[in-house]
Image: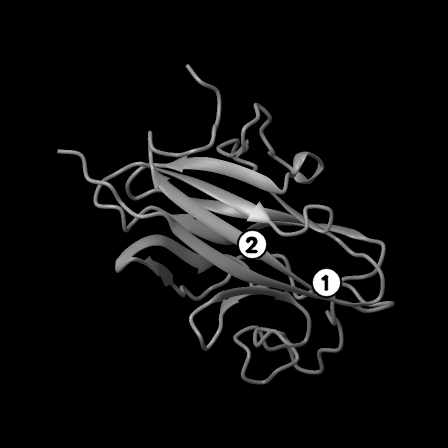
């Protein structure tokens, strides 16, 4: 008998602060701590996310937030930040009219689907400002044949397949626009492999 699992969806908040003369130099390295969040839909946990860079963190409501500003609790100028650097004055946000790429900002894993492969879709609310890629060539442009493997090929609607126990780090291409704050959302959906309403990868 085939088990049908409900569709899982998650909205992530992405916040940028455009600050003239500053850079997004928290640092480009993986987070040392391991924080996990599970998304629940119809009483079934479906999507497992955790931060991969200091720019991503789990807020007090249990949501994964990506924040390139001093509002991020991981900002190195805060004494209680795990990345504290004494006398830190940099990293106030994204520089305007600049482009940044960050590997493995957050991870999506398949640890909650009862030994079932899944198809995951990740959608940007503003692909011109932030889009996604995976340098390991395991990501596809949704309903297309291209693979967004670096910042030059990043896309705003991507998908990938995860087998039980696997995870994929999501890289992000960020475009710094005008001065001021920017807020966007990332929507993540997942289906059992074979039940997805999208095309993900090359059909064999």
Q: Nearer the viewer, residue 164 or 47?
A: 47
**Spatial CA span between label 1 and label 2:** 20 Å
Sequence-wise first label, 1 or 2: 1
The relative height of residue 2 versus residue 10 in the rendered view (above or below) is: above
- Decide: few, some or many residues near mark 2? Use Cα within 10 Å; few <14, some 14-19, many ≥20: many
Which residue in the protein does label 2 denote?
A: 186
Q: Nearer the viewer, residue 196 or 66?
A: 196
Q: Give the residue displayed 52% in from the left and 52% down from the top.
A: 187
The relative height of residue 31 versus residue 136 in the rendered view (above or below) is: below
Q: Give the residue displayed 55% in from the left and 59% down from the top.
A: 53
**Circle number at residue 24:** 1
Q: x, y (%) of residue 48? A: 37, 55
Q: x, y (%) of residue 113? A: 26, 46
Secondary structure at badge 2 equals strand
Q: x, y (%) of residue 199? A: 47, 28
Q: x, y (%) of residue 122? A: 52, 45
Q: Nearer the viewer, mark 1 or mark 2?
A: 2
In which quadrant of the rendered view does residue 85 lie?
bottom right
């Amino acid at each position: 008998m085939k088990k049908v699992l409900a569709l899982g969806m998650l909205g992530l908040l992405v916040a940028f602060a455009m600050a003239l003369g500053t850079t997004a130099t928290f640092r480009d390295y993986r987070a040392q701590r391991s924080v996990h969040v599970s998304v629940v839909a119809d009483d079934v946990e479906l999507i497992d996310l955790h931060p991969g860079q200091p720019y991503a963190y789990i807020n007090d409501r249990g949501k994964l937030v990506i924040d390139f500003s001093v509002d991020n609790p991981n900002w190195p100028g805060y004494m209680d930040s795990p990345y504290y650097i004494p006398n830190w004055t940099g990293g106030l946000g994204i520089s305007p009219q600049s482009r940044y790429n960050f590997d493995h900002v957050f991870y999506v894993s398949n640890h909650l689907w009862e030994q079932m492969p899944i198809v995951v879709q990740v959608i940007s609310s503003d692909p011109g400002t932030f889009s996604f890629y995976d340098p390991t060539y395991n990501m596809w442009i949704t309903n297309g044949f291209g693979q967004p493997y670096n910042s030059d090929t990043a896309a705003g609607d991507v998908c990938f397949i995860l087998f039980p126990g696997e995870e994929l780090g999501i890289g992000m291409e960020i475009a710094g626009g005008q001065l001021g704050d920017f807020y966007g959302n990332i929507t993540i959906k997942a289906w059992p492999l074979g039940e997805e309403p999208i095309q993900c990868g090359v059909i064999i």
